[in-house]
Image (cartoon, rainbow, N blue to C red):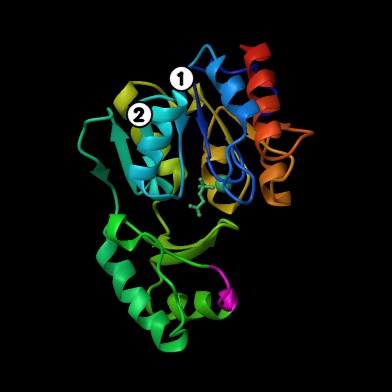
Amino acid sequence: MREGSGFPEIKAIVVDIDGTLTDMSRLISLEAVAAMRQMPIPVILCSGNVICFVRAAAKLLGASNTMIGENGGVVLHGFDAKAIVLADIEECRRGKELLLKEFPELESLDETYRKSELAFRRGIDLEKARSIIAEDYPGLEIVDTRFALHLKHRNVNKATGMRKIAEILGMSTQNFAAMGDSENDLPMLKEAGIAIAVGNATPEVKAAADYVCQKSYGEGAAEGFEWLKRQL
Ligand SMILES: O=C(O)COP(=O)(O)O
Ligand SMILES: [Mg+2]
């Protein structure tokens, strides 16, 4: 929310999945699901995870059939629609080959399902990996979500995914509230009309939020949904 302005007209809420609706073992919170189902506005799931995972989650949870995957690299509008791919995975593949020279143990996650970026298991020396990528692929970056490391295009993120969704739905990103927990959520929290951080969010994410939940993980998300509902 911009300083001095009134509460924006919120028409949908864009919600991160891991660490926001779930705990660190990716177990979904029933409290968060119950609160989500009570929302009078669409709940748009937005994750670093692959779009088929987000799609299944949206269907099972009763979220909107419009959603964002791969940190904004893929957007789906309609459960049976064709995914819209917004970034070129080939450069990320070349970046991965470079990383493999330094980190032969690098483990790719869900690579068969990825369309716009790559994800790796955490545990490698992140600063070293970042400097290797910065040197040869300045257009790429490595983002740590605390669940995985993502090798992605710098100019594609959850905010650009949200802009695409806004365009499709004929809205402004100022009409969205956004809720999240980690580094990959920062762009969308800064772009949204209202930003909510769950209690377990990183200090940077909390600093970007209009409302910081007292509670963490799914209980925090439930609190965030209820807070927003009271403001609408
Ligand atoms: O896929 C990840 O690394 C994290 O996913 P998230 O964006 O839903 O938290
Ligand atoms: Mg998250």
Q: Under tag 2, what secondary structure?
A: strand
Q: Under tag 1, what secondary structure?
A: loop
- Amino acid identity at mark 2: Thr
Residue at (47% x, 84% y) in the render: 103
Question: Picture quarter containing residue 91?
Answer: bottom left
Q: Nearer the viewer, residue 140 or 143?
A: 143
Q: Nearer the viewer, residue 141 or 5?
A: 141
Task: Sort mark 2 into few (<14), some (14-19) or many (20+) by Cα contacts within 10 Å.
Answer: many
- Image quarter of the C terminus: top right
Which span is picked out in magenta?
122-127
Say if mark 1 contacts mark 2, CB within 8 Å.
yes
Task: Sort mark 1 into few (<14), some (14-19) or many (20+) by Cα contacts within 10 Å.
Answer: some
- Give percent across and percent down for residue 161: 39, 41
Sequence-wise first label, 1 or 2:
1
Q: Nearer the viewer, residue 106 or 25?
A: 25
Instruction: State the mark number for residue 42.
Output: 1
- Give percent across and percent down for residue 68: 39, 39
Residue at (69% x, 20% y) in the render: 227
- Give percent across and percent down for residue 121: 50, 67
> In this orientation, does residue 1 appear?
no
Q: Nearer the viewer, residue 156 or 31?
A: 31
Alpha carbons under labels 1 and 2: distance apart: 9 Å
> In this orientation, does residue 144 appear?
yes
Residue 82 falls within the magenta-colored stretch: no
126 displayed left or right of 231: left
* Residue tagged 2: 66
62 displayed left or right of 29: left
In the rendered image, the residue lying farthest to the right is 214
Residue at (38% x, 74% y) in the render: 137
- Give percent across and percent down for residue 58: 41, 31
